[in-house]
Image (tube, rainbow, N blue to C red):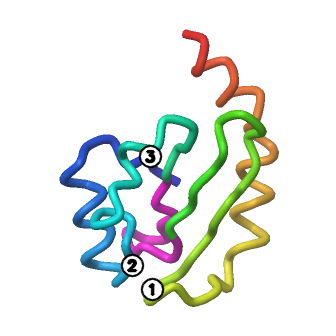
Amino acid sequence: IKTLDSVDEYYEEGRTQHICVGSSQYYLKAESLVFSARIDGKTVATVEIDLRTLKVVQCRAACNKVSEYQQRIENAIASHREEIKARMTA
């Protein structure tokens, strides 16, 4: 799971996944963090978490389909909530 760290990365994620994460300017959402979940370098889902609750808001595969890895991704994020919280205050 990799964070999208630049505006260009948001647009590239949107292009490759055929979703609106770039064109809808998710990079401007102050209370969200967006990840690209990848397996062997291939994006399997784009994930948005709410920084207030540290819970998954969206987890979408290409073309806004449900990712077959959604539960696995949600579990991974849940198990790293304290790490995320610590980095938010660093």
Real-space Cα separation, disc 2 to disc 3, in angstroms: 16 Å
Q: Taking 59 as reference, is 76 left or right?
A: right
Marks 1 and 2 in Cβ contact (< 8 Å): yes
The one nearer the camera, 84 or 24, is 24
Q: CA distance from mark 3 to mark 1?
A: 17 Å
- Find residue 15 and report its horizontal and vertical position in percent: 25, 77
- Between 51 and 41, the one lying in front of the other is 51
- Residue 13, quarter of picture: bottom left
- Which residues are drawn in magenta? 35-45
Q: Which residue in the rendered view is the most extreme toward the top?
A: 90
In the rendering, which numbered label is found on residue 3? 3
- Residue 16 in picture, x, y percent from top left: 28, 78
Mark 1: secondary structure:
helix
Magenta part, dominant SS: strand
Mark 3: which amino acid? Thr
Q: Is residue 34 above or below residue 80?
A: below
Residue identified by numbered label 1: 62
Q: What type is the residue that disc 2 sits on?
A: Ile
